[in-house]
Image (cartoon, rainbow, N blue to C red):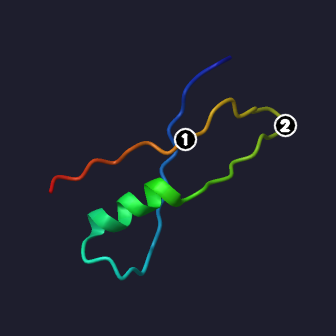
């Protein structure tokens, strides 16, 4: 079976940014994430989805 799933990540951060939006933008642009294959699940593509905040 081939399917798309969405995994949410909770991160507690400390930042010198003035707004959460700036911190989220930096994380989206520079953070890396590693999710490995399991015996029964092969990762085909992994990417951060953009989280749009109202300014």
Q: Earlier in the sequence, mark 2 or mark 1?
A: 2
Residue 49 locus on image (x, y percent): 44, 42
Under tag 2, what secondary structure? Answer: loop
- Say whether residue 43 is left or right of residue 4: right
Q: Which residue is mark 1?
A: 47
Residue 15 locus on image (x, y percent): 39, 80
- Say whether residue 28 is left or right of residue 55: right
The span from disc 2 to disc 1 (Cα, nearest Å) is 21 Å
Q: Specify the quadrant of the image occupied by residue 50.
A: top left
Point out the residue furthest to the left here: 55
How crowded is the residue under tag 2: few (<14 C-alpha within 10 Å), some, or many (20+)? few
Q: Residue at point 60% right, 56% down?
A: 32
Q: Residue at point 52% right, 59% down?
A: 30
Q: Which residue is mark 2?
A: 39
Check the picture and name the quadrant holding the C terminus.
bottom left
Check the picture and name the quadrant holding the N terminus.
top right
Point out the residue furthest to the top here: 1
Q: Residue at point 55% right, 41% down?
A: 47
How crowded is the residue under tag 1: few (<14 C-alpha within 10 Å), some, or many (20+)? few
Q: Residue at point 62% right, 54% down?
A: 33
Q: Specify the quadrant of the image occupied by residue 37.
A: top right
In-front residue for pair 15/9:
15
Residue 16 locus on image (x, y percent): 36, 82
- Total marks in image: 2
- Say whether residue 30 is left or right of residue 35: left
Residue 21 vertical position relative to residue 7 in the rendered view, above or below: below
Are the two marked residues, 2 and 1, in contact with CB atoms closer than 8 angstroms? no
Residue 3 locus on image (x, y percent): 59, 22
Under tag 1, what secondary structure? Answer: loop
């Amino acid at each position: 079976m081939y399917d798309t799933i969405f995994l949410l990540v909770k991160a507690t951060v400390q930042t010198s940014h003035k707004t959460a939006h700036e911190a989220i933008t930096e994380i989206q642009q520079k953070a890396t994430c590693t999710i490995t294959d399991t015996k029964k699940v092969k990762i085909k593509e992994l990417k951060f989805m953009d989280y749009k905040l109202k300014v």
